[in-house]
Amino acid sequence: MDYEIRYKPAFAAIFVTLDPGEVITAEAGAMTSMDAKLTMKTHFSGGFFSALLKKLFGGESLFVNTFSNETQQPLNLVLTQSSIGDIVSVELRGRDLCFQPGAYICHGTGVKLGVRWAGLKSWFSGEGLFKLQVSGKGIVFFGAYGGITRKPIKGDFIVDTGHLVAYDPGIKMNIKLAGGLLGSLTSGEGFVNQLTGTGDIYLQSRSIGGLLAFLSPKFK
């Protein structure tokens, strides 16, 4: 499978070329355009119960679409995300990766979709009770509103809620006030996410929550 991520970082889209016999699986609604000879099939994301958990408690779609090339010639497909922003690809190579709600876009052969219990603290911060977790050996694409940066961490690291996109599953999250009750209220920071562990995290430069907070007063 050949691909190119174009229009980075603000309006990124994935241009994929599937050779005969190749397959790619994408979030429902991710397809922008495709060659008419591609075969598309819809099924539950990771199985019925896994899909139901992700839909009810993780903010993910109930279904995914599988695009396969059953012809004898290369065929093209364009995929993207619903919000404007950046898209990155990661080759798993046996590692796992957890996504915040809405970050996952698509994956290639060898990658499995699953769910991971995130805890009540994650739900309290508005990030859902369950996280989408990908595992296996293959390529996965994900995106976010704004630019995306990979950040290796070791020990403790603070991230404002709404800016964490993806993280290694061994990293633990702890939602806390930014600086005590008074400081959190007056600083405008509110809750922050204290990450603890060793591994990679992916951060987005903007947040949908921040955009909504900025726009809401203008529509009153």
Image: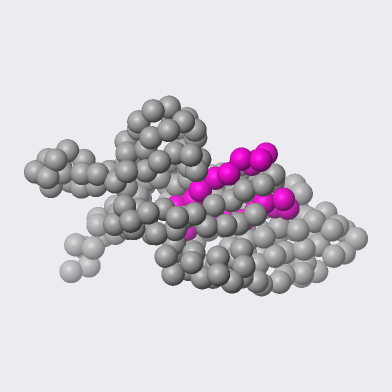
Give the colouring mode of the picture: one colour
Q: Quadrant of the C terminus?
A: bottom left
| Residue placed most toward the observer, 195 or 219 | 195
Residue at horizontal 59 percent and vertical 51 percent from the top: 134
Q: Is residue 151 left or right of residue 106?
A: left
Q: Is residue 168 left or right of residue 5?
A: left
Residue 150 in view of the camera: no
Residue 171 in view of the camera: yes
Q: Tell me where residue 73 sits by quadrant.
A: bottom right
Residue at horizontal 62 percent and vertical 48 percent from the top: 135
Residue 85 in percent (x, y) is at: 47, 50
> Residue extending furthest right?
72
- How many labels were placed on the picture? 0
Residue at horizontal 71 percent and vertical 58 percent from the top: 24
| Residue placed most toward the observer, 116 or 81 | 116
Q: Is residue 101 magenta?
A: yes
Q: Is residue 111 above or below residue 30?
A: above
Q: Is residue 11 above or below residue 57?
A: above
Residue 107 in percent (x, y) is at: 65, 53
Q: Which residues are magenta?
A: 91-111
